[in-house]
Amino acid sequence: MKICVATGTRAEYGLLKPLIDKIKLVKEWQLQLLVTASHLSPEFGLTYKQIENDGLNIDAKVEMLLSSDTAEGVVKSMGLGMIGFADALKVLQPDLIVILGDRYEMLALASAALIYKIPVAHISGGETTEGAYDDSIRHSITKMSHLHFTSTEDYSKRVIQLGENPSNVYTVGALGLDNTLSSNLLSKKEVEDELQISFKKYNYLVAFHPETLAKESSESQFRILLNALDRQDDSFFVFTKANADTDGRIINQMMKEYVLKNKEKAVMFPSLGSQLFLSVMKIVNAVVGNSSSGIVEAPSLHTPTINIGNRQKGRIQSDAVLNAEMNVDDISSCFEKIKSRDFQDAVKNASNPYGGGKATDKIVEALKSVNMASFQTKLFYDL
């Protein structure tokens, strides 16, 4: 069986890497890697090179990302993706495509797979992120998929509610925790040497992405966050670039300008790679912003998260996560709360609702047992 794993972003690849490695080990399977979107963009660090450095063969590269983050640019990028995926799938002819999450490039791929009659295995369906159009994209991919690997029982129920057959829905936990709980993380000194930085008394990993359904602009929202950061004394901020969503570039530009003005307390990276990203996450006092990594992975490292705004609204959360409204005072109060002894003790004892880091093994076992012929006709499952 030819299994094609698709990836379009640095974060997504980090989540998929353990699964990719396990698929390679199954003699009856042939791994195919389809790489697209920001992986192939110099602006986002040409992260396809990391995939190659990991010793993996890339079977197809699909250029699709325009140098524009307007709605028009994103839609045109999706169109280019559809054209490129049409060519790639004609050559690869996989028996199954593995898609993770809710990115617009994956919506284009799932649409192409639908027309090619190629079954899709969808990871992380059933979740909700009310502040971004990713929410609708995720549910749309669910409806074009045949196998579903969800991170919690509640999300499995939601996938079934969308009309998917329960026999094809597997609760496996969050794939990101496989790396989080098994990686050999670097020490504080090793991270400082690798990144050529010096941590301070308080340190924060800042990952902020566009809230694509918000009435306020990304510029005004990120300005609020930067103003809150300015209130923090004796602090050091490690920024990672925003993703290639609508208005993502204005965030990256503001990030760059902030770092240039505050070289003594801030640094910015297009991509840290999985090991470094998780190592920084383990070291810092908190993850700050609106990235899913602060909701899913950080609690397993006993690192608190200040989750800002509505991008992740609706996700199941650990007690290690604090939610802040999009205003300076509320964000600042969360910075003060994470420094309290009571909250630090609560974070140490907080459980992670996204599982214990065995998602990869569960997915592989499910794939071994599945009857591919049963996917020829997909029926709506009525509750």
Image (cartoon, rainbow, N blue to C red):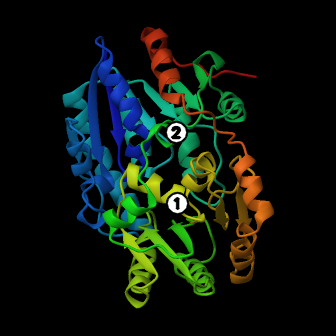
- State left or right for residue 348 relative to residue 133: right
What x and y, as percent, mark residue 17?
A: 37, 37
Q: Compared to 54, does 308 lie above or below?
A: below
**Which of the pair 2/136 is nearer the observer?**
2
What x and y, as percent, mark residue 254?
A: 44, 82
Q: Residues within 10 Å of mark 2 (few under 14, many from 20)?
A: some
Indicate the secondary structure of the residue bearing disc 2.
Answer: helix
Q: Compared to 186, does 162 lie above or below?
A: above
Q: Residue furthest right?
A: 342
Q: Earlier in the sequence, mark 1 or mark 2?
A: 2
What x and y, as percent, mark residue 372?
A: 43, 12
Q: CA distance from mark 1 to mark 2?
A: 15 Å
What x and y, as percent, mark residue 125?
A: 58, 37
Q: Amino acid at mark 2?
A: Leu
**Which of the pair 113/159 is nearer the observer?**
159
Residue at left offset 49%, top offset 32%? 122
Which image quadrant for residue 288? bottom right
Residue 317 seen: no
Q: Nearer the viewer, mark 1 or mark 2?
A: 1
Q: Amino acid at mark 1?
A: Ile
Q: Compared to 301, does 190 lie above or below?
A: below
Which residue was labeled with disc 1?
283
Q: Residue furthest bottom?
A: 261
**Which of the pair 154/344 is nearer the observer?**
344
- State left or right for residue 254 relative to residue 76: right
Which residue was labeled with disc 2?
181
